[in-house]
Image (cartoon, rainbow, N blue to C red):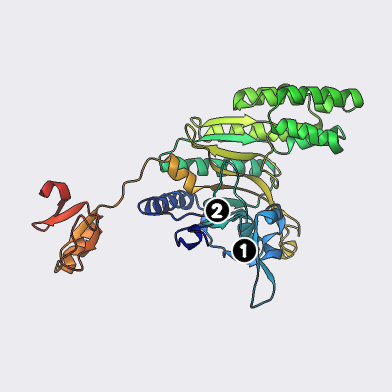
Amino acid sequence: MSDDALNPALLPAGLADLLPPDAEREAALVEAMLAVFAGHGYERVRPPLLEFEEGLFAGSGAALAEQTFRLMDPVSQRMMGLRADTTPQVARIAATRLARQSRPLRLCYSGQVLRVRGSQLQPERQLPQAGIELIGGRGPAETVQADAEVALVAAEALDTVGVAPTLDVTLPTLAPALFEAAHLAGPARQRLAHALDRKDAAATAALVAECGRANPIAAPALAPLPALLQAAGLADGALAALEAANLPPAARAIADNAAAVVAAIRARAPGLRVTLDPVEFRGFQYHVGVAFTLYGPGRTGELGRGGRYLSPGDPANTALGRGAGNEPATGMTLYPHAVLRAARPAPLRPRLFLPAGTDPAAARSLRAAGYATVAALSAADTPQSLRCTHVLENGRAVPFGETL
């Protein structure tokens, strides 16, 4: 047996302990973000870690089936899944437990998720999440405002913890709409999608030209792709490229919706940096409208992701006049572990050493003043051994070093 097999601190790949003081900082960060969500009317829900897989994989959850750990429930003898994302669970709650509540619903959550595999850029398999979902709407104008609200509330939550975010808007349905208009399928579609995914401008231009020669009727639908690929960047330039492009009707509707969402965001947060990538679609399997990614400054990576999707409906909705189909919804999930790396370090509560026999009433008063009181259990306990920053001197808390 190897030495690693005997090491009780060894954990599976992608799993890690979070130790003091980072665990406390992450918890405080999550609560600060949830306070922002609550301030905008988002009510907290707490889904279970495990669900029967039929419910977990309904609607948008189907896209996460390959990332979900499964196990047999010894009580019901049915298969269960350990959630890989919280959004599908919130959608289920909206469609069932809250089916009769008036729309739109504003819900928020926090908790851990577990995934079968990490990625090269994000090897962690257990991840904390904190997010919001805005479910229900009565028309295009309302959904535009909902998309803008969710993006802005998430950006405000990051700003509250000291991160100045960039909001990247993507249109995951635009490239597929152009493929459909060109009747592009099979290997040709796969090669062109791969070139777009790799941001390979030369390959994209060559493949568009090749497809146009093979099917001149389809050429106009694919012709905008090279220019749209090059247009990714600040929103103004990308929107101008979309406006100038000769798009088929379905793609034009997607572009116009994106322009309306960006305008709604700018009307409420003119100082927010907004970028737009018209042909990005990686990782947005279940999004049906604009999608968002929030980035921090420098190389902090993705801090959150979300966008428009369809929340599975419930048959009870038919009696309520909402139909039995899907509901429009939009949401944003923030990743506290990534936000923690990008945020300014939150000040921790000072640790105050309490000698044995300290008056309990005095200790309560000090805790109310913001100190974490650490009581000595024996004469061997010292401020150093208990990692205290303050000690009592004449009934007052003073920094430990100042008493020397």
Give the residue type that dot 2 points to: Ala
Question: Residue 303, relative to residue 64: is it above or below?
Answer: above
Q: Position of residue 181 (x, y in %)?
A: 84, 34
Q: Position of residue 133 (x, y in %)?
A: 58, 51
The residue depicted at 37 percent of the width and 54 percent of the height is 24
Question: Residue 265, relative to residue 58: is it above or below?
Answer: above
User: Which residue is at the front of the view, 140 or 356?
Assistant: 356
Q: From the viewer's perspective, is the residue at label 2 or at label 1 nearer?
A: 2
The residue depicted at 64 percent of the width and 73 percent of the height is 73
The residue depicted at 38 percent of the width and 40 percent of the height is 344
* Residue 217 occupies quadrant: top right
Confirm or deny contact between disc 2 and disc 1 (CB under 8 A).
Answer: no
Task: Please name the residue that numbered disc 2 is placed on.
Answer: 13
What is the secondary structure assignment of the residue under circle 2?
A: loop
Question: Residue 350, relative to residue 373: is it above or below?
Answer: above
Q: Residue furthest front?
A: 1
Q: Is residue 141 something that shows in the picture?
A: yes
User: Which residue is at the front of the view, 192 or 331?
Assistant: 192
The residue depicted at 60 percent of the width and 26 percent of the height is 233
Q: Residue furthest bottom?
A: 75
Q: Position of residue 314 (x, y in %)?
A: 72, 62
On residue 98, the disc is 1
Q: Position of residue 386 (x, y in %)?
A: 24, 58
Give the residue type that dot 1 points to: Leu
Q: Is residue 253 something that shows in the picture?
A: no
